[in-house]
Image (spheres, rainbow, N blue to C red):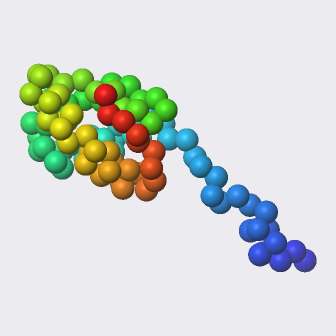
Amino acid sequence: MKLLKNFLARKNFNKKIDLDEKTVFYIFEKVIKKEYGRMGGENIQPRFYKKGKIFIKTQSSNWANEIWLNRQSLIKKINQELGREEIKEIK
């Protein structure tokens, strides 16, 4: 009979699972709505995700400026929700 600890030792539980675009967008929208409310959720939309970068579209330059000024704080909050340092940049 095999021991459970031998089985667990062979398994790689630290394996990094790639996140899909939908998951990242869901977390992004959740953080945006929490920070900026309904108006922020309506005016700031994620468009594309690739290699740790979220590309967004805003309805006005004022929203773009708001995101740009608070991007480090938003990245930190998104990564906390994801549970790891996945997001590197918001563009």
Q: Residue at (36%, 36%) from the top-left corner?
A: 89
| Number of numbered labels in the structure image | 0
Q: Residue at (74%, 68%) from the top-left corner?
A: 8
The location of residue 45, given as percent across then percent down, is 24, 29
Q: Residue furthest right?
A: 1
In the image shown, does 30 or 83 lie closer to the viewer? Answer: 83
Above-or-below relation of 51 to 27: above
The location of residue 76, given as percent across then percent down, is 32, 51
The reply, left or right, for residue 21 in relation to residue 71 is: right
The reply, left or right, for residue 78 in relation to residue 65 is: right
Above-or-below relation of 64 to 39: above
The location of residue 18, given as percent across then percent down, is 55, 41
The location of residue 67, given as percent across then percent down, is 19, 35
In the image shown, does 45 or 71 lie closer to the viewer? Answer: 71
Q: Quadrant of the rendered structure where residue 32 is?
A: top left
Quadrant, the C terminus: top left
Q: Could one spot residue 30 in this view of the protein?
A: no
Q: Quadrant of the rendered structure where residue 56 is?
A: top left
Q: Quadrant of the rendered structure where residue 4 is?
A: bottom right
Q: Could one spot residue 84 in this view of the protein?
A: yes
